[in-house]
Each structure stands twice: as C-alpha cells, then as structure tokens.
Amino acid sequence: MNPYHRAVRAALAGMERERAVRWLAAHPLDQEERDCIAEIDVYGHGAVQAADRLFLSTETVKRRRRTGYGRIAAALSG
C-alpha cells in the first residue's frame, strides 16, 4: 500500500467516528469516495458489505476508496 494512503488510514483509525466523518467531509472528495472510505475505515465494514450498503459493485468501492486516499494525500502534502 502507498505510504501516503497508509498515513491516511492511520489518521482515521485514531479518531472517533463522528470526528473521522467530519474530517473526511473537510477534504475535497466526491460523495461516493467519502462514503466508501467511511464505510470501510470508519465503520469497519468489509468491501462486500460496503458495496451492498451503498448499492455499488465491490470493485467500484475499492476504486473509489483508493482514489479518495489519493485526493486526501495530495491535499495534505501540498
């Protein structure tokens, strides 16, 4: 995993749920990216479970999450 993505995951893991959701909302993400990251990293659901809850395919959830990590890392680095 990309070290920047790992740093984003570590930051989310250290926050309580409400704060993590607010932190995600403060970053330039699409709604789907925000929802996918929140479902997996904040609420602890698996990719399949998140896909069922968001009415998306599993691959879309994984792709949106990866893209969201990239956007957050880019915003944090400069």
Image (spheres, grey):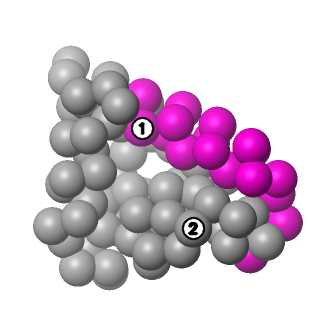
Disc 2 secondary structure class = loop
Q: Is residue 70 above or below residue 51?
A: above
Q: Is residue 76 above or below residue 65?
A: above
Numbered mark located on residue 69 in the image? 1
Res 67 quadrant in image: top right
**Residue 24 on image: x %, y %:** 38, 56
Q: Main secondary structure of the magenta part?
A: helix
State the extent of the magenta-drawn residues as a range: 53-70
| Crowd around label 1: few <14 · some 14–19 · many ≥20 (10 Å) | many
Quarter containing the C terminus: top left
Residue 8 coordinates in the image, percent (x, y): 27, 45
Q: Is residue 53 above or below residue 27?
A: below
Instruction: Let me know if residue 61 appears in the view.
Output: yes
Q: Which residue matches tag 2?
A: 46
From the viewer's perspective, tell me whether residue 66 is left or right of residue 63. left
On screen, residue 22 versus residue 64, left or right, reads: left
